[in-house]
Image (cartoon, rainbow, N blue to C red):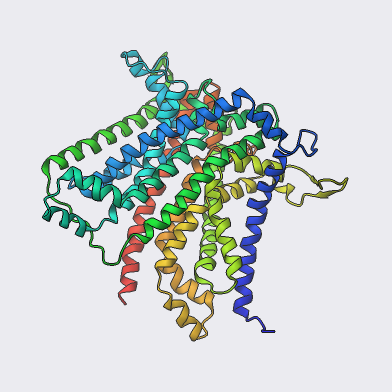
């Protein structure tokens, strides 16, 4: 029997530790959620009775229909707008492309509740545009669709811009030689060339809209969707069995979307050939003018949309006293002084999530991509790493309650119980850190994997042949060359942890309150100005972090290029 080397033992320990993290903070909670769905309120096995009960409930089917309707319509709208934006930003000669792209991404930097509140200021019963005669049925389907459409635009834009940038100019040159018109080139070359990215954008936006909790909680009114139904069942009625059933029902469309996304992503990657010629933008003055006007209109709408919330945060009492004031930014007066504490808590949690999440995700990607031993364990780690992308935040939050709250676990079919060794995490800051890392783990993992795949495998082969410990290669070569990806991962973890609601709404307490959940509570209490002020603070923090990242990214990019030329 061959004796393991020190390096193999070290790598196995890293793999085992990451695997253990997934077992405790992903697999365990999901198993508890699944088990709860097959039990009655007394804890006895009920088979499919719970599913039959709630599937046969008209209100539940209505909520499912509402969720699907909102998701489908908002997905079509957001992807259509993002398609035109991505086309203009990649295929047309217009000034200010970076500015237009940054403004289009603003919805990613703010809680989705802010989108709903902006709509209230514009189209509510006392809204600015309502007073001018522009009346829409805001509370319900219309308000949710508008919010989710805006929410989905930046996500679809990023995906489609990558797809457009992978075009092969040779196809367009051949089409021009054959006298093909612009419209025909669009339908025979451009759209077929980005079809996998387009499908990817459709399913990602669908998942975001289908699972979002923030916007429906603000402008949903009596138009119930599955995300808010789970909240009502768990928080309002303490019916965890019903919440578990609804959670599993919510996961079905997202899992299908996730599978399609993975399939199309692989095909899109394999469609890029080493012989492809980068697309060359052709002169077309009319198309350039139209593209600039479209980007300018979207930018003005975005700025106006967020500007109205900034205005709403600076008035005394909407809509009766429009005197400007900074009193709404006195966070010590919000919810008996909890406002400032919630902001500091959000910052603390987000910084820890960014730090620990980036370390775990990068090490996970490293052992999956660069380690040649333990192939079966590495495949299992890969599955665990991408699985959170298919699980709605509301479902993860509910699963954490079921797993970390009980002091004891009953063994099914027996009278025995075992102590829950992880119950000490419940009602702590640590559990908020853990749930955010797991909830947003997949995208940073894929980012790290992509960056590591681009590095030459010769680094590891040469290190092995020279008997250089792998940790030295990791610290001195792999990490420095991956600095840009690592920064991107940390920013992604931080920004999403600052604005998330769905994953933490079940887990926050008065002592661990985070700003995004506080916004929901303050807005629900009718204090829209204070809620808008809190939203603007989160937006400002995330914008500052993103701009800081762009600066550091520029610096590291220059240093990496200089290092490669040595």
Location of residue 302 in the rendering, given as x and y in whole percent from the top left corner: 32, 34
Q: Is residue 458 above or below residue 123?
A: below
Q: Is residue 474 left or right of residue 24?
A: left
Q: Residue furthest bottom?
A: 466
- The foreground one among 132 and 427 is 132
Q: Quadrant of the C terminus?
A: bottom left
Q: State whether residue 67 appears in this view.
A: yes
- The foreground one among 555 and 109 is 109
Q: Is residue 326 left or right of residue 422?
A: left
Location of residue 73 in the rendering, given as x and y in whole percent from the top left corner: 41, 31
Q: Is residue 164 above or below residue 460?
A: above
Number of numbered labels in the structure image: 0
What's the residue at 45%, 51% (across, down)?
491
Q: State whether residue 334 appears in this view.
A: no
What's the residue at 23%, 45% (across, down)?
186
Locate residue 64: give its quadrant: top right
What's the residue at 32%, 44% (across, down)?
102
Q: Quadrant of the N terminus?
A: bottom right
What's the residue at 11%, 50% (across, down)?
179
Location of residue 93 in the rendering, given as x and y in whole percent from the top left corner: 17, 48
Q: Residue furthest right?
A: 415
- The foreground one among 92 and 363 is 92
Q: Is residue 326 above or below residue 94?
A: above
Location of residue 327 in the rendering, given as x and y in whole percent from the top left corner: 46, 26
Q: Is residue 110 left or right of residue 24?
A: left
């Amino acid at each position: 029997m061959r004796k393991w080397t020190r390096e193999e033992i070290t790598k196995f320990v890293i793999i085992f530790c990451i695997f253990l993290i997934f077992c405790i903070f992903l697999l365990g909670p999901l198993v508890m959620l699944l088990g709860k769905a097959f039990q009655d309120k007394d804890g006895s096995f009920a088979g499919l009775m719970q599913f039959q009960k709630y599937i046969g409930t008209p209100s539940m089917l209505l909520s499912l229909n509402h969720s699907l309707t909102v998701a489908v319509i908002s997905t079509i709208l957001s992807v259509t707008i993002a398609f035109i934006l991505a086309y203009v930003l990649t295929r047309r000669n217009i000034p200010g492309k970076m500015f237009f792209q940054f403004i289009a991404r603003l919805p990613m930097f703010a809680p989705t509740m802010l989108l709903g509140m902006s709509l209230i200021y514009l189209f509510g019963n006392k809204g600015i545009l309502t007073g001018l005669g522009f009346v829409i049925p805001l509370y319900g389907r219309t308000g949710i669709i508008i919010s989710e459409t805006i929410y989905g635009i930046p996500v679809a834009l990023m995906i489609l811009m990558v797809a457009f940038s992978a075009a092969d100019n040779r196809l367009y040159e051949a089409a021009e030689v054959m006298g093909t018109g612009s419209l025909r080139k669009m339908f025979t070359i451009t759209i077929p060339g980005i079809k996998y990215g387009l499908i990817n954008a459709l399913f990602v936006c669908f998942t975001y809209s289908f699972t979002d909790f923030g916007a429906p909680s603000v402008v949903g009114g009596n138009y119930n969707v599955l995300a808010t139904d789970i909240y009502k069942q768990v928080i309002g009625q303490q019916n965890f069995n019903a919440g578990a059933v609804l959670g599993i029902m919510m996961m079905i469309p997202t899992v299908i979307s996730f599978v399609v996304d993975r399939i199309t992503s692989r095909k899109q990657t394999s469609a890029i050939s080493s012989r492809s010629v980068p697309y060359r933008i052709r002169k077309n003055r009319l198309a350039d003018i139209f593209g600039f006007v479209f980007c300018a209109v979207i930018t003005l709408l975005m700025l106006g949309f967020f500007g109205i919330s900034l205005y709403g945060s600076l008035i005394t009492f909407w809509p009766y006293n429009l005197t400007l004031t900074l009193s709404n930014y006195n966070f010590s007066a919000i919810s008996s002084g909890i406002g400032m504490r919630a902001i500091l808590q959000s910052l603390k949690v987000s910084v820890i999530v960014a730090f620990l999440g980036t370390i775990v995700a990068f090490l996970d990607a490293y052992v999956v991509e660069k380690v040649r031993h333990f192939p079966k364990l590495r495949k299992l780690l890969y599955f665990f790493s991408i699985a959170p992308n298919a699980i709605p935040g509301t479902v993860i939050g509910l699963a954490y309650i079921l797993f970390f709250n009980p002091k004891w676990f009953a063994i099914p079919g027996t009278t025995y119980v075992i102590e829950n060794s992880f119950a000490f995490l419940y009602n702590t800051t640590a559990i908020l850190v853990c749930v955010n890392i797991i909830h947003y783990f997949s995208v940073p993992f894929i980012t790290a994997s992509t960056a590591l795949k681009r590095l030459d495998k010769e680094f590891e082969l040469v290190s092995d042949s020279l008997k250089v410990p792998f940790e030295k290669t990791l610290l001195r070569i792999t990490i420095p060359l991956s600095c840009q990806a690592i920064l991107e991962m940390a920013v992604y973890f931080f920004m999403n942890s600052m604005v998330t609601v769905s994953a933490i709404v079940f887990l926050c307490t008065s002592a661990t309150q985070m700003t995004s959940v506080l916004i929901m509570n303050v807005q629900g209490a009718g204090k829209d100005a204070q809620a808008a002020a809190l939203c603007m603070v989160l937006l400002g923090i995330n914008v500052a972090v993103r701009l800081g990242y762009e600066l550091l990214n520029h610096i590291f990019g220059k240093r990496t290029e200089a290092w490669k030329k040595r």
